[in-house]
Amino acid sequence: MSSSHDNNTTERFGFADDGVIPNHPSFELLVHRAAFAPEPGEPAVSAEQLFGANGWGGFWRDGIYPFHHYHSTCHEALGVARGWAEVRFGGESGGRTLRLEAGDVAVLPAGTGHCRVAASEDFEVVGAYPPDQPFDLIRDAADHDAAVERIKAVPTPATDPVFGPDGGLRAAWKTLTRPAA
């Protein structure tokens, strides 16, 4: 299952290492707007089906932590099943706050900082990961240097959680040319 979503509604954001949140040295955060249509009743199932059909798993349903954190051992997809949230990506300094709404999917490369700033009362997000990429959760600056090395070792997924083997991260992360910070 791939999405009928168009690559033209994908936004890209790159963030530099701020000494606390490493972010990814090469890959950008991707935000696929209106990537899926949440079904009434059980909207999280729509995201899980899309992600699962495109080879991503390890699903969970919840909110986003209200503190800055990142994952050094995996890339992550966050699909908004219901409601909305303002999420700070990239860390406190040099990051950017984005509003995510039901149907949006954020694809975070390993190391990308994220923190919920505000959310609707009904906000629910579905998280997913590529195969063989167990997640960790890091928020302590003391872990930064070791995390940077782990982030560099995380392989590019074989599929995008929205577009499958074509488009999305497969195109964006392959052709990325980021200016030096």
Image (cartoon, rainbow, N blue to C red):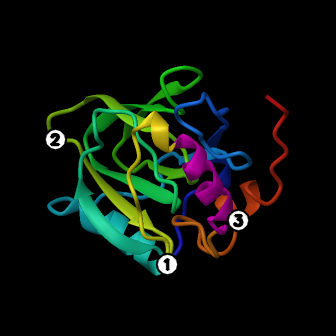
Q: Which residue is mark 1?
A: 131
Residue 180 vertical position relative to residue 128 in the rendered view, above or below: above
Residue 99 picture quarter: top left
The foreground one among 169 and 64 is 64
Which residue: 14% across, 35% down? 121
Distance Cα–Cα, label 1 vs label 2: 29 Å
Q: Secondary structure at mark 2?
A: loop
- Residue at which label 2 appears: 122
Residue 126 forms part of the magenta stretch: no
What amino acid is found at the position of numbered circle 2 in the picture?
Answer: Asp
Image spot of residue 84 (x, y percent): 30, 36
The residue drawn where x is 62% and y is 70% is 157
Nearest to the observer: residue 181 or residue 38 = 181
> In the image, residue 112 lies at what x, y percent?
54, 44
The main secondary structure of the magenta stretch is helix
Q: Compared with residue 163, is residue 99 higher up or lower down, i.e. above or below? A: above
Marks 3 and 1, how far apart in space? 15 Å
Q: Nearer the viewer, mark 1 or mark 2?
A: 1
Q: Which residues are magenta?
A: 144-156
Q: Which residue is mark 3?
A: 170
**Disc 1 element:** loop
In the rendering, at what x and y percent does residue 170 appear? 70, 65
- Left or right: residue 55 versus residue 166 is left
